[in-house]
Image (cartoon, rainbow, N blue to C red):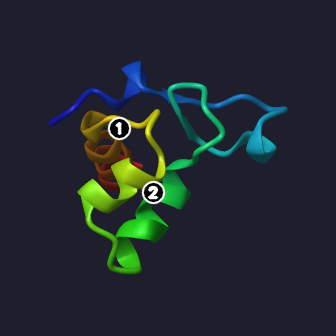
């Protein structure tokens, strides 16, 4: 399992304190929502070039352990 603590940041002034990916404004919830809506990981990465595949798996890991 991925150690999400290295990738997930929570800042009070960013996205209302929601857990974000590597300090970006993309939240764990955003990624989970895209996956739940049927987007594939390659589609997500194409739409958000700053994301890495590891970021998606980190969001899933965070969701499972939170």
Placement of 10 over or under 63, stated as above or below? above
Give the residue displayed 44% in from the left and 39% down from the top.
Answer: 49
In depth, the one of 66 and 35 nearer the eye is 35
Location of residue 11 (image quadrant):
top right
Outermost residue, bottom side: 37
Residue 55 at x, y percent in the picture: 35, 37
In percent of width and height, residue 23 lies at: 60, 26
Residue at 31% x, 52% y is: 60
Q: Mark 2 sits on what residue? A: 31
CA distance for labels 1 and 2 = 9 Å
Image: 6 above or below 42? above
Residue identified by numbered label 1:
55
Residue 56 left/right relative to 21:
left
- Which image quarter is the N terminus in? top left
Residue 3: give x, y in percent of width and height.
Answer: 27, 27
Quick check: marks 1 and 2 in contact, CB under 8 Å?
yes
The residue depicted at 45 percent of the width and 57 percent of the height is 31
């Amino acid at each position: 399992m991925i150690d999400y603590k290295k990738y997930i940041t929570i800042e009070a002034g960013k996205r209302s304190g929601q857990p974000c990916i590597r300090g970006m404004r993309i939240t764990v919830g955003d990624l989970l929502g895209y996956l739940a809506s049927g987007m594939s990981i390659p589609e997500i990465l194409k739409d958000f070039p700053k994301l890495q595949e590891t970021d998606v798996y980190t969001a899933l890991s965070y969701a499972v352990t939170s």
